[in-house]
Image (spheres, helix red, strand yellow):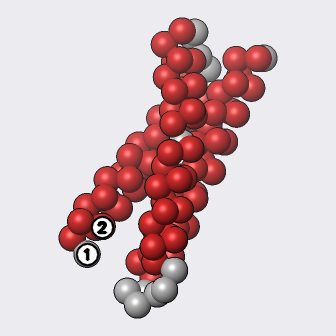
Amino acid sequence: MFLRISWWVATTWLALAVWGVVYFAWMWLSGPGNPLRHEALMGMTIAAFYSWPALLAGGVLKWRWESPLLERRFFGVLMLLGVIVFVTIAVMSEVL
C-alpha cells in the first residue's frame, strides 16, 4: 500500500512539473513580442528544476523495490513525455 501511494505521489509531482513546463512554454511561444517572455522562460526553468525530486523518487522506487506494473508504465510514459517536452523547448529556445 505504501509503495503504491509513493508511486502515485511521485507521478503526480512529475505530472504537475510537466504541466508547468508546458504552460510556460505555451506562454513563451504565444507571442514573440510578449513582455512576459522572460518570466515564462524563468517559469519553465523553475518547473523543470522542481521535477527532479519526482524523477529521483521514481528511480529509487524502480531500483529498490518491485513496483506495481501500472504505476511503472504510467511513470515511464510521463517521464518520456517530460523528456520530449524539455528537449523540444531547449532546441526551440536555441533556434528562436
For residue 96, which numbered disc appears in the image? 1
| Mark 1 closeness class: few <14, some 14–19, many ≥20 residues within 10 Å | few
Q: Residue 6 vs residue 64: left or right?
A: right
Residue 54 x/y as whole percent: 57, 34
Quarter of image, res 65: top right
Q: At x 38% / y 53%, what residue is drawn?
A: 86
Residue 69 x/y as whole percent: 57, 23
Residue 22 in view in this figure: no
Image quadrant holding the N terminus, namely top right
Check if mark 1's residue and mark 2's residue have beta carbons within 8 Å: yes
Tag 2 residue: 93
What separation in Å lies between label 1 and label 2 (alpha carbons)?
A: 5 Å
* Up/down of 34 relative to 49, above or below: below
Q: Residue 20 vs residue 86: left or right?
A: right
* Up/down of 83 relative to 69, above or below: below
Residue 19 in view in this figure: yes
Residue 51 x/y as whole percent: 54, 42
